[in-house]
Image (tube, rainbow, N blue to C red):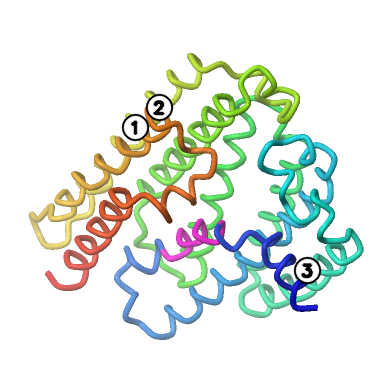
């Protein structure tokens, strides 16, 4: 039983839950981090997104068992390797659905609709959109925007800068394109056999798109800092720009030179310079928003 629970948890991809930190964007940037009510309801929304994303991962692994068995790394997943039975995975998905959706609607009807829309969109991605070049990474980016939107809705703020929505979109596109590039390099000539959409990409195309999206991500974040005046005539948020520049450049360096990027969450967990850039950026944001 314990081993089965461990396999189910592995299939739920807890490392991927890092993505749900975007739910906290509105809470932090609206200066409500120290408001206990807003903090608790945002935390609940983030947990529900973790459960919703895990539900999608389980369904996705059930649908992709055969193709995952042909992949050099995905073949080790619990379902693909046969360690976890389909029956157990289906039962787990049903339980997650019965917990996630009613709880989300009880907490807030708008949050319930966003999470339902997120799951439907991600399932549509797994079934159809992931096979369409460019559309696939756009759908991934939409998932991040929905996380941010949920955070904005749940604390009912009208002060959240639209530039952060735009910046989040391009950051997600940047990460998604980097992942596609890493997959092509890892699988090389056999890439289309493992992920059909990779047949629609080339390294040259992805490099050009990465350059465009990196520039746009930085530009939109800078526009946010210009508009986020903390005090009259003050532009303190501009002090966070160097950390964003380094973080973006570091990610590009890792996927182009070190050939990482197939699992972006692994970079955040394991790469010390990236961790330092994120930590310093976060600390600077907190000092500017809450202490100045």
Query: Dot 2, crowdedness within 10 Å: few (<14), some or many (≥20)?
Result: some
* Boundaries of the magenta span: 16-24
Q: Does the magenta stretch include residue 32?
A: no
Q: Which of marks 1 and 3 precedes in the sequence?
A: 3
Q: Position of residue 197 (x, y in %)?
A: 69, 26
Compared with residue 58, is residue 183 higher up or lower down, i.e. above or below?
above
Res. 253 mark: 1
Compared with residue 73, is residue 198 higher up or lower down, i.e. above or below?
above
Q: Distance between the residues labelled 2 and 3?
A: 39 Å
Query: Dot 3, crowdedness within 10 Å: few (<14), some or many (≥20)?
Result: some
Res 157 → quadrant: bottom left
Residue in the picture at 59% in, 63% down: 14
Q: Quadrant of the C terminus?
A: bottom left
Residue situated furthest bottom in the rendering: 36
Q: Does the magenta stretch include residue 17?
A: yes
Q: How far apart are marks 3 and 1 (CA)?
A: 39 Å
Q: Is mark 1 on a helix, strand or loop?
A: helix
Q: Where is residue 63 in the image (x, y as percent from the top left)?
A: 84, 46
Q: Mark 3 points at which residue?
A: 97
Q: Where is residue 127 in the image (x, y as percent from the top left)?
A: 79, 40
Q: Is mark 2 on a helix, strand or loop?
A: helix
Residue in the picture at 40% in, 27% down: 256
Left or right: where 285 falls relative to 135? left
């Amino acid at each position: 039983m314990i081993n089965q629970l461990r396999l189910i948890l592995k299939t739920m991809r807890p490392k991927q839950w890092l993505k749900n930190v975007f739910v906290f964007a509105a809470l932090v940037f609206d200066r409500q981090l120290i408001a206990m009510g807003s903090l608790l309801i945002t935390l609940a929304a983030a947990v529900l997104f973790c459960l919703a994303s895990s539900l999608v991962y389980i369904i996705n692994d059930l649908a992709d068992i055969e193709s995952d068995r042909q992949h050099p790394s995905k073949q080790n997943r619990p379902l693909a390797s046969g360690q976890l039975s389909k029956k157990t995975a289906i039962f787990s998905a049903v339980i997650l659905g019965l917990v996630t959706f009613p709880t989300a609607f009880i907490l807030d009807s708008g949050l319930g609709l966003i999470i339902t829309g997120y799951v439907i969109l991600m399932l549509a991605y797994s079934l159809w959109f992931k096979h369409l070049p460019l559309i696939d990474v756009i759908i991934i980016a939409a998932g991040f925007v929905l996380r941010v939107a949920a955070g904005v809705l749940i604390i009912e703020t009208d002060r959240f800068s639209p530039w952060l929505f735009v910046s989040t979109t391009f950051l997600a596109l940047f990460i998604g394109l980097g992942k596609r590039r890493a997959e092509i390099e890892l699988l090389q000539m056999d890439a289309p056999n493992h992920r059909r959409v990779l047949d629609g990409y080339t390294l040259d195309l992805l490099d050009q798109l990465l350059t465009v999206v990196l520039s746009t991500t930085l530009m939109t974040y800078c526009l946010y800092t210009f508009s986020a005046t903390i005090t009259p005539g003050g532009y303190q948020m501009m002090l966070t720009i160097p950390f964003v520049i380094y973080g973006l450049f570091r990610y590009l360096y890792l996927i182009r030179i070190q050939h990482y990027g197939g699992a972006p969450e692994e970079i955040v967990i394991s790469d010390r310079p990236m961790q330092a850039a994120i930590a310093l950026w976060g600390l600077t944001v907190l000092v500017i928003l809450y202490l100045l």
